[in-house]
Image (tube, helix red, strand yellow):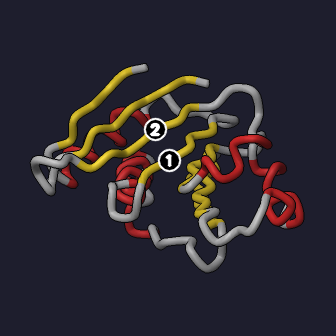
Amino acid sequence: MSIYISRNEQDTIRFAKDFAKKLKRGNIIVLSGELGSGKTKFVQGVLEYFGLAEEISSPTFTIVNEYIKDDVNIYHFDVYRLSDTDEFYAMGGEEYFENGICLIEWGEMIEEILPEHYTKITFRKSEDNVEYRELLVEEK
């Protein structure tokens, strides 16, 4: 496990852009943390790295947004509104895993059905400074 301290939204975006350099098809990134902890800012940074920053929107009501750049497919999920893993299966969610890079906000809700290997990033707000975040990166 590694820990990154973000001092503001721009730090989170920079971290995500650097993190995105290693991403390739089949990578699954679970983004976990309370509302407003930086998950969507992280996604913004990944999309900026791939030249897709203009296109970001929250998938809260659609569950998944698809971004395509050259030969890279990026799938941004927000599974917060799913009632259970069956809903994820019903939408064909597992078919996305092999076809691109999956960024899954609230992914802890479907961890039991994820492939064996994925990365989990937990975003924690600081008690001392409203802007600071602790990002815990774990390879599963």
Q: Label 1 near label 2: C-beta < 8 Å?
A: yes
Q: Is residue 54 above or below residue 123?
A: below
Question: What secondary structure is found at the residue carrying circle 1?
Answer: strand
From the image, which quarter does the N terminus lie in?
Answer: top left
Say whether residue 70 is visible. Answer: no
In the picture, measured across the screen, residue 40 lies left or right of residue 104, that is left
The residue positioned 63% from the left and 55% from the top of the image is 75
Residue shown at 69% from the left, 35% from the top: 26
Tell me if I can see residue 31 in this picture.
yes
Residue at the extreme top of the image, as rendered: 1
Quadrant in which the C terminus appears: top right
Alpha-carbon distance for marks 2 and 1? 5 Å
Give me the disc on residue 121. 2
Horizontal side of 31 relative to 133 (left or right) equals right
Residue 99 position in % (x across, y down): 75, 45
Identified at 40% across, 33% down, the residue is 19
Q: Who is closer to the viewer here, 103 or 72?
A: 103
Residue beneath disc 1:
31
Q: Point out the residue furthest to the front here.
A: 127
> How crowded is the residue under tag 1: few (<14 C-alpha within 10 Å), some, or many (20+)?
many
Q: Is residue 130 above or below residue 123?
A: below
Decide: is 3 above or below 70: above
Name the amino acid, label 2: Ile
Return the x and y of residue 95 as percentages of the image width and height: 83, 50
Q: What is the count of numbered marks?
A: 2
Residue type, mark 1 in image: Leu
Question: Which residue is found at the position 39% from the left and 68% from the top?
Answer: 54
Q: Where is residue 132? Give x, y as percent.
A: 17, 47
32 on left or right of 125 = right
Element carrying mark 2: strand
Q: Earlier in the sequence, mark 2 or mark 1?
A: 1
Callout 2: few (<14), some (14-19), or many (20+) C-alpha neighbours within 10 Å? many
